[in-house]
Amino acid sequence: MNQMPLTVRRAIEVTGLFFLGWIIVLGRDLLAPLLVAFFISIMLLPIYRFFKQRNFPDAVAIGISLLTLIVVLGGIIWFFSSQMRVLIEDFPMIQKNVMKHLTALSEWIGSKTPFSTAEQTSFIKEQSNNLLTYAGNLLGGVAGGVTGTVVFIGLLPIYIFLLLFYKNLLLRFVFLWFPRERHEKVEETLSEMQVIIKSYLFGLLIQITYMTVLLGGLLMIIGIKHALLIGVIFAFLNLIPYVGALLGNIIGVLLTLASSEELWPVLAVLGTIAAVQFLDNNILMPRIVGSKVKINALATIVGVIVGGEIAGITGMLLSLPIIAMLKVVFDRTDQFKQWGVLFGDERPGLSPMAIPVLRWDTKAVRRQLEEENDIEPPHEGEEEKPKE
């Protein structure tokens, strides 16, 4: 491979990435639950190891881990259902408030534009019909996807159980792909991936909790209706980089407008969300997740869009940990190091056009860039290596 001309090698890399993406698109219905199960199984490893160290059989240790997961998910579903029940009970008041806001908006438009109330009503009816048609098509698509969702949920615990049960077999499979002299680097890569994924996913779990409590609590103190629902929706949507925060703000505003006859609560919700998000992005999240791997904004946005095109919301949620995994692998391989640089946030302060040393791939240069960008690479011994 190294004897080939550089252009041929780069062409093979791009072609390989294209076919890899094609395979992912074709097999997304299989890969989506498998990837979700893979990440969840990594989160369940501490529980599994706790019971294994106390001489529990594999099946029992995995069963207890799955039961813990089911209890947590059951609590989340119960919370959502209870909040939605309160929202449904308030529907008559919501309908009244919506009509009041629409009337006020119509009067304002009539005072600023030549459109009369009758013309606005005609326009709203026309757009409502279009919206109903779109909603009907959307519901038809959702109904058609119910079977896929049921299959997804049904496969998830099976995949998690099998991944944990056969993890040693899978690790042996990975090592057999490489010659013996590369096994040390493979072990180091696997350990680093485990550290990064666990710190990232547990960080997100903590983030959901404190965002729900902090944002929901502050909104309750202010006196916003459905404060906890707004908090939990924003906490979950905030897991989707960039796009999720925007959607969370929009849903928060809509829920507040529908539940209040005044406009000041909207400003209170937007201000509270902005303050909590600033606190999360600049103080809490960096301390919880740490700075093991930083993915640059360009790679994050592209990854979220591509993930959404491939697997919808699931793909958007999985995009960041998958990119982090790929970066770890690329950084450890000689042929794909440039792709690791493309995904990362080790941004040089000076141009490689002016400073030739920044064009080199040496440990000294990498370490300098990591220090400049506050990136702390995982160290050996920080996490138990996957030997079991």
Image (tube, rainbow, N blue to C red):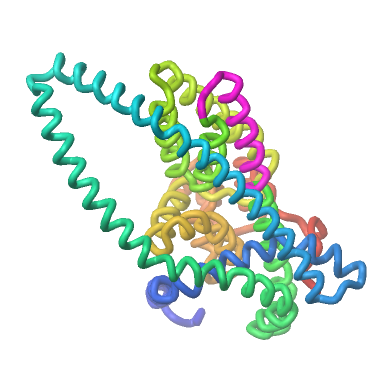
Instruction: Give the percent coordinates (x, y) of residue 370.
Output: 63, 47
Q: Is residue 110 above or below residue 247?
A: above
Q: Which residues are magenta?
A: 204-225
Q: Residue at x 24, y 48 (%)?
A: 132
Q: Return the residue found at the far right.
A: 54
Q: Residue 235 at what x, y percent from top left?
A: 56, 40
Could one spot residue 284 in this view of the protein? yes
Residue at 14 percent across and 30 percent down: it is: 121
Compare residues 305 and 237 and report the one nearer the observer.
237
Is residue 222 within the magenta segment?
yes
Residue 240 shown left or right of residue 185 in the figure: left
Q: Is residue 121 above or below residue 355?
A: above
Where residue 283 sits in the image (x, y, percent)? 65, 32
Up the image or down, 197 lies above or below 48; here it is above
Please indicate whether residue 77 sits to the left or right of residue 183 in the image: left
The C terminus: image quadrant: bottom right
**Picture quadrant where residue 154 is located:** bottom right
User: Seen in the image, is 266 located left or right of residue 385?
Assistant: left
Drawn side of residue 113 relative to residue 137, left or right:
left
- For the point 62% across and 58% down, the residue is 362
